[in-house]
Amino acid sequence: MESVFILVVVGLTSAGAYILGITRLGFSKSGLWLALGKACECVGLTLVFCVLNLAVAMFAIFVMRSLSGRFVSLYIASDTTFFMLSWLQALAFQAWREGSRRHHTSESYDSELLHRQP
Amino acid sequence: MIRGLGIVTVVAFLLVSFTPLPNVLNQWAGVTAQLQPAAAIVVLGGGMDGDGVLSTSSLRRAIHGIMLFQRGFAPLLAFSGPVSRPLGREEAEVRAEMARLLGVSPAAILTEATARTTRAEAVCMAALLQPRGVSTILLVTSYAHMARSRQLFENVGFTVQPAPVDDISHVHTPEARWESMRPLVQEFLARVYYRIAGYL
């Protein structure tokens, strides 16, 4: 019951956003597939950062254990905050990557224009 | 590559949230109870806050152990659980105090407060109980934690009868499914680590 309720609510708001985007904001239909692809990239990056953070955290805990001689629990590495921060890392990295791509594209376009000038 | 990873993650997210997959995985990884009389009931540590309040897991394990004792499954009740900073209270002692208040004879209660890992708990409990002639135990810990714990206690010479608490293999809401996946993933990683370290 809860599962169906959640899916219906998210389905309704998604449909609303789609209609708003097409009718009022002038978004293209094909742009949605591109955006979904970018969203999947961001999710993939979140997973990469999660695994990276987990590996570094475990390594750091082992180093702390061996250097200080004190017990540090490995369960610290499973804190939910790591997941949220990994998501933020992925968002920032994705935006950075997109920004750099746009910058490169506009730079190469400008230089092409310069070379064409007589 | 990254996009493919994202698609796999989204599919996994949907499967965990909206299908019985977590229940199936937990049933596969968990151990069912085998409640038979034993020489002692061993209740593993489950964590305590710095202010001396038992975690939900610790409390559930302790109550389950006390109930088994009150039902006559064993003449000894052993609690594990280390000192929690900054107050310096022992989790094992807090649970022992609770057991005494709930009517368990002080003579039947044993505590072990030095072990900080499951492996250390097995070794320390062996040192505490085996000189008393205890070889068969009822082991009380969380459902997902039982398989690894059982193996570690068998490795130090105990015959283990599992008495798991928190059976998380029958959850029905998306949030509960996610909560049930967390200990499963933790245990999976712990098993990998214990295998690499040669403890299992």
Image (spheres, rainbow, N blue to C red):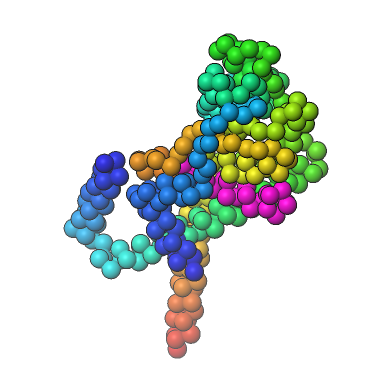
The residue lying at 58 percent from left, 28 percent from top is B37
Q: Quadrant of the C terminus of chain A?
A: bottom left
What is the magenta range? B179-200
* Quadrant in the rendering for residue A28: bottom left
Looking at the picture, tell me which residue is in the foreground, B98 or B13: B98
Looking at the picture, tell me which residue is in the foreground, B6 or B64: B64
Q: Position of residue A5 (x, y in %)?
A: 26, 43
Q: Is residue A66 visible?
A: yes
* Quadrant in the rendering for residue A73: top right
The stretch drawn in magenta includes residue B182: yes
Specify the principal SS of the magenta part: helix
Looking at the picture, tell me which residue is in the foreground, B79 or A6: B79
Left or right: A42 with respect to B154? left
The residue lying at 60 percent from left, 55 percent from top is A52
The residue lying at 41 percent from left, 62 percent from top is B7
* Quadrant in the rendering for residue B42: top right
The residue lying at 28 percent from left, 48 percent from top is A7
Q: Quadrant of the N terminus of chain A?
A: top left
Q: Residue furthest bottom?
A: A118
Q: Is residue B46 visible?
A: no
